[in-house]
Image: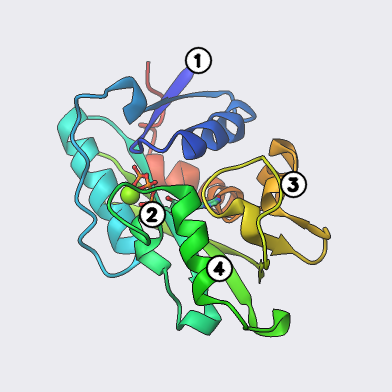
Amino acid sequence: MNKIVIATKNAGKVREFAALFAKRGIDVKSLLDFPDVPDVEETGSTFAENARLKAEAISHRFGCPVIADDSGLVVDALGGRPGVYSARYAGEDKNDARNIAKLLHELEGVPMEQRTARFHCALAVAIPGRPTAVVEAACEGYIAEAPRGEGGFGYDPVFYLPEKGKTMAELTPEEKNEISHRAKALAKLDEQWDDIMGGEGRME
Ligand SMILES: O=P(O)(O)OP(=O)(O)OP(=O)(O)OC[C@H]1O[C@@H](n2cnc3c(O)ncnc32)[C@H](O)[C@@H]1O
Ligand SMILES: [Mg+2]
């Protein structure tokens, strides 16, 4: 089976990529399989820059094609925050529950129609000796007033999808993978896959 390395230690992302790539007949390895690899510093000011930094650093280290995901939550009433700082919004330990608590606190008193937000995902594909490709996609919704649901990860319990009448965390994994920012970005990669890989996508 073909394999691809995803430059992430986020178990939620790994789970979603494993399911999304399984459909494509590709087996996923992540940095959870290589715990000694240190985190790549996310010094960029955009999702695209950070995805590129992570993909190129890990591709350089491993000498093989690597995909990286930089994603986050963009909240209009907060001027776009937490944005690229989503993982560490409430502190360096990247705690989902504390990130959600801080978000709800900052949005206290903001009426529902002004709680518009989107999940954003940038995916970078770095291949030794080739230019890095970056694609981006978003998923629109609202920040709920209280968390609901057990699925997904990160901010999913407070990300409300009006067309579903549910938060992202109330969807099944299959439903999330039909509409998420990550799934949409991966669909864009699919369209460019042959060009990006240039015949080097087949890894053993
Ligand atoms: O950098 P890597 O190792 O990939 O892992 P990370 O958790 O630090 O990932 P990011 O830097 O891309 O930060 C993304 C944060 O945005 C949030 N996020 C991204 N995608 C999400 C999703 O599908 N559902 C809920 N929250 C999400 C979540 O809190 C993540 O911690
Ligand atoms: Mg990160």
Counting from the top left corner in percent of width and height, residue 132 is at 29, 52
* Residue 136 visible, this angle: no
Report if the CB atoms under discs 3 and 4 are less than 8 Å apart. no
Q: Secondary structure at mark 2?
A: helix
- Residue 87, numbered label: 2
Q: Secondary structure at mark 3?
A: helix
Q: Where is mark 1, residue-wise?
A: 1
Q: Is residue 61 left or right of residue 75?
A: left
Q: Residues within 10 Å of mark 4 (few under 14, many from 20)?
A: some
Determine the residue positioned at 79% across, 67% down: 162
- Residue 167, numbered label: none
Query: Which three-letter amino acid code belongs to the residue tagged 1?
Result: Met
Q: Earlier in the sequence, mark 2 or mark 4?
A: 2
Query: Which three-letter amino acid code belongs to the residue tagged 3?
Result: Glu
2 or 1: mark nearer the eye: 2
> Is the residue 7 above or below the residue 157 in the image?
above
Q: Quadrant of residue 34?
A: top left
Determine the residue positioned at 69% across, 37% down: 173
Report if the CB atoms under discs 2 and 3 are less than 8 Å apart. no
Q: Earlier in the sequence, mark 2 or mark 1?
A: 1
4 or 1: mark nearer the eye: 4
Which of the image's four quarters has the C terminus? top left
Q: Secondary structure at mark 4?
A: helix
Q: Where is mark 3, residue-wise?
A: 170
Q: Earlier in the sequence, mark 2 or mark 3?
A: 2
Q: Residues within 10 Å of mark 2 (few under 14, many from 20)?
A: many
Q: Where is mark 4, residue-wise?
A: 104
Q: Residues within 10 Å of mark 1 (few under 14, many from 20)?
A: few
Question: Disc 2 beta carbon < 8 A from ligand 1?
Answer: yes
3 or 4: mark nearer the eye: 4
Give the distance between the C-alpha atoms of the residues marked 2 and 1, in whole angstroms. Answer: 32 Å
